[in-house]
Image (tube, grey):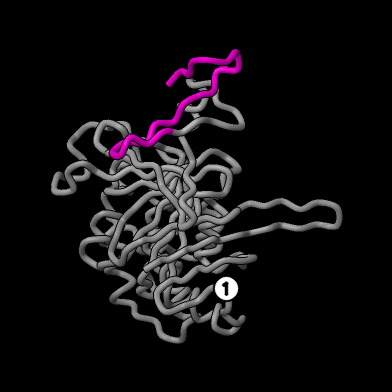
Amino acid sequence: MIVCEGLVKIFKTDDLEVVALQGLNITVETGEMMAIIGNSGSGKSTMLNILGGLDRPSAGQVRVGEWDLLKITDDQLVEYKRKTVGFIWQNNARNLLPYLTALENVEMPMMLSGKIDRAYAKQLLEWVGLGERLHNKLFQLSGGEQQRVAIAISLANRPSLLLADEPTGSVDTQTSDLIMDIFRRMNKELGVTIVIVTHDLSLASKVDRVVAIRDGMTSTEFVKRNPNLGADDGERKSIKEGHEEYVVLDRAGRLQIPKEFLQALEITNKATMEFDGKTITIKSPNILGGNTDE
């Protein structure tokens, strides 16, 4: 569904140039539900904005389904955002129109595409547990209910890709779990591919695969040890408890060693490497000479 290779995004002003993504590689399979994590400034939201058609990439390759987002025209970009991708922001104000009811909010993207399907709009609100709140306006809904309306809106035009930027960042733990259950159901029943950007590691642990981004590049990947187990066994666990951690290599063979490993070995700008036929060992050079410490 998504293929990014050497993806670069540079933001420029008159006297400043910031490289937000510097050769990012990531692949997302059709029908997958996965999460992207990273510290503030790592580039995760920039990548999501590019996938959502909100930002243009500077270089590299980025494909979503049949669309090449590096070469897409402005008219094609409008069609892409209407038909292929749905977007959920953490801030409800970017998702919802306060003077409309929940049902009218869901029908708005349908209207912009030229065809209102009221029955489907009602069905979406029923799926997110708001079948009794169709005609309520925003001030009559809680923050969690508003976010569930936003999920229904994002699915109004039957997109094949759903992007969620910190979708549970402004709700409590119980509502967060409910929203994740809704995502899981939409993923299974509608077959929509879902990419979630989050800093909440317990939320990220509820998906099969998690990709960590550091300094604008893919650094680490976590894959669930047993994908046949339910996404939630009743406990909010960390990623490392239920996932296997992998260091990701790019096409040139480069990898990002986890920062805590480098700090533990006191590795800064260079290291020694040994290969015994089966294992690659990275060591910290001893500046006093002689021995090395693994």
The local crowd at label 1, few if under 14, some if 14 to 19, many if 20 or more residues have their Cα within 10 Å, is some
Q: Magenta stretch: dominant SS?
A: loop
Q: Residue at 30% across / 67% down in the picture? A: 30
Q: Tell me, yes or no, if residue 142 can be seen here.
A: no
Give above or below for 138 relative to 178.
Answer: below
Query: Is 25 positioned to the left or the right of 246 in the image?
Result: right
Q: Amino acid at mark 1?
A: Leu
Give above or below for 107 relative to 13.
Answer: below
Q: Residue furthest right?
A: 15
Query: Is 8 positioned to the left or the right of 68 in the image?
Result: right
Residue range corresponding to the magenta coloring: 274-294
Q: Residue at 41% across / 33% down in the picture? A: 274
Q: Tell me, yes or no, if residue 33 can be seen here.
A: yes
Taking depth in this image into account, of 123 and 199 the one nearest to the observer is: 199
Query: Is 217 positioned to the left or the right of 245 in the image?
Result: right
Residue 116 x %, y %:
39, 82
Q: Quadrant of the C terminus?
A: top left
Give above or below for 286 relative to 273.
Answer: above
Q: What secondary structure is found at the residue carrying circle 1? A: loop
Taking depth in this image into account, of 172 and 137 the one nearest to the observer is: 172
Q: Residue at 54% across / 61% down in the picture? A: 6
Residue 239 x %, y %:
32, 35
Residue for badge 1: 70
Q: Residue at 36% across / 61% down in the picture? A: 28
Query: Is 150 positioned to the left or the right of 70 in the image?
Result: left
* Magenta stretch holds residue 101: no
